[in-house]
Image (cartoon, rainbow, N blue to C red):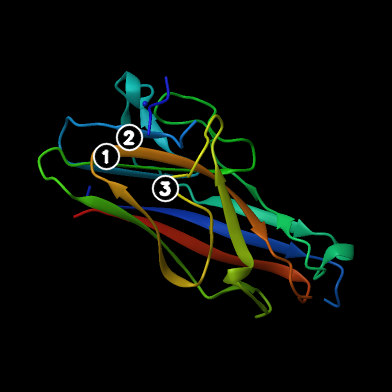
Amino acid sequence: MEPRPFRAPAIRTALLALLFALFGIADACAYTVTIGTGTKAAYLRIGDGTMTGGNYNAGGTPADNTTVNLVSVTVPAASVGNATAQAMTGTGRVTSDWDGFAFCNAGQTYIAAFFRLPTNPNQSATLRVNTPVNLTSAGGDTIPISQISWTSSGNGDTGAQPFPAGTFTGGTQTLATLLRNTWAESCHSFSYANAAIRAAGTYDARATYTLATP
């Protein structure tokens, strides 16, 4: 893994909301950086994030950001339930906190994590996400959360991503393991499988991402 021409307590969480609106029915290698100096620290960013004092590689410092980013799609009436996947659009900043590089494209969700533990070998942090089993509308109708999946990429990247593609399963699922003294980032593009006809309405759910360190 090679650096691009390169981000900190023990558990950090970030939130990503998922929203749907359905109408018309009867209702190079992937970017990873090695950092070996400094105190124990962990940083997680999903979508928006805050870095004070410039980019991290120029001495910037991560700060808390309570923004809940949104990923959404409005399914056209003529397309509801036709099994054609619908691309979802995310909100949030798409530039890297490491160096300001435009790592993701508009509509993608930037995801990055950093775990620094200079003195203890063979340690790693774990990125997990927790979601409900279903997205739910105000009327009580549901869509299985497993209808939501994502691909993973990054501008200028080739090869496997540190935070790979996947599908929400409901409950808590492990997404990736981050080795000590590394910083990694990927861009997730979400989509809705649109596999069945659903009642008209707005369906939502919240995904909570957690980076847990030893």
- Which residue in the structure is indicated by mark 1? 8
The vertical placement of 51 against 211, above or below, is above
Residue positioned most to the left: 119
Closer-to-camera residue (66/20) = 20
Question: Which of the labelled discs sits on residue 27, or is there none?
Answer: none
Q: Is residue 142 left or right of residue 78?
A: left
Q: Quadrant of residue 134?
A: bottom right
**Outermost residue, right side:** 78
Q: Secondary structure at mark 3?
A: loop
Nearer-N-terminus badge (1/2): 1
Looking at the image, residue 130 sits to the left or right of residue 104; the answer is left
Give the residue type that dot 3 points to. Answer: Thr
Residue position marked by numbered label 2 in the rendering: 62
Secondary structure beneath label 2: strand
In the displayed structure, 31 sits above or below 82; it is above
Give the x, y percent position of residue 79: 85, 63
